[in-house]
Image: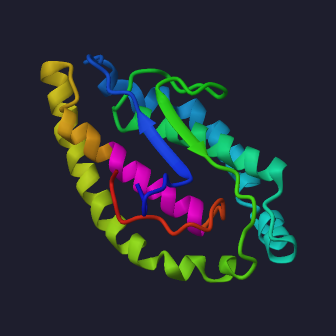
């Protein structure tokens, strides 16, 4: 929650009761075809000029480009959740599965803010670099926990989801220009 309102970029993952012990050995290999697809799509997603100039001149995000970017992010985060061992569902191109990502379409954007959003996001980048390092340590601990118990420890799961949520909010704000609302310094 941000100052009494819901942040326009939301992300959550359903907690799995049990995870496969054998898939933790193969997920990096099973996901390889998705990396090929993701890199092809990523080429198109990294052409932010269409959105940047439209926001600069019309104060609007092109609806078609917005929908494309949100779907690209959904797909990307399904892959991340799979790789970070949070779910065993093989990522799909076109359905949410147990990964929920939603972005509210912005009605009116500040035309000058895209010029400095990257600068305003630097404090988030520093904190996220540290949290990302901790998240990889959490991943290693979770790997062993899944191997022995077939469960992802809930506090570690919530932390990892929180880091992904924070990272998504900062990316949506500073790089994809999907919102003008400054992201909170929060895992929730």
- Scheme by which the image is coloured: rainbow
User: How far across and down, in percent of the image, does residue 156 sit?
Assistant: 21, 41
Name which residue lies at 52% across and 23% down: 97
- Magenta stretch prevailing secondary structure: helix
* The quadrant where residue 52 appears: bottom right
Q: Position of residue 188 (x, y in %)?
A: 34, 50
x 53%, y 33%: residue: 32
Seen in the picture, residue 77 relative to 23 is either above or below; the reply is: below
Q: Is residue 16 magenta?
A: no
The quarter holding residue 28 reads top left
Is 46 located above or below residue 188 in the figure?
below
The answer to whether 175 appears left or right of 80 in the picture is: right
Seen as rendered, the residue at the extreme left is 148
Which residue is rendered at x = 72% and y = 69% of the image? 109
Q: How many marks?
A: 0
Asked if the stretch drawn in magenta spans residue 170, the answer is: yes
Residue furthest front as drawn: 4
* Residues rendered magenta in the picture: 161-174
From what the image shows, is residue 117 above or below residue 80?
A: below
Q: Quadrant of the N terminus?
A: bottom left
The percent position of residue 17, horizontal first and vertical second, equals 26, 18
């Amino acid at each position: 929650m941000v100052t009494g309102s819901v942040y326009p970029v939301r992300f959550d993952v359903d907690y799995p009761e049990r995870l496969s012990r054998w898939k933790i050995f193969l997920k990096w290999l099973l996901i390889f075809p998705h990396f090929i697809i993701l890199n092809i799509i990523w080429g198109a997603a990294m052409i932010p000029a269409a959105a940047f100039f439209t926001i600069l001149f019309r104060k609007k995000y092109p609806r078609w480009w917005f929908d494309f970017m949100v779907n690209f992010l959904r797909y990307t985060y399904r892959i991340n959740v799979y790789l970070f061992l949070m779910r065993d569902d093989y990522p799909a191109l076109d359905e949410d599965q147990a990964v929920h990502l939603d972005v509210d379409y912005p009605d009116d954007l500040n035309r000058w803010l895209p010029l400095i959003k990257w600068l305003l996001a630097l404090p988030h980048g520093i904190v996220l670099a540290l949290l990302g390092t901790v998240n990889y340590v959490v991943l290693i601990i979770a790997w062993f926990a899944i191997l022995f118990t077939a469960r992802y420890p809930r506090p570690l799961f919530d932390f990892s989801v929180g880091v992904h949520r924070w990272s998504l909010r900062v990316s949506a704000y500073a790089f994809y220009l999907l919102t003008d609302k400054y992201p909170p310094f929060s895992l929730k």
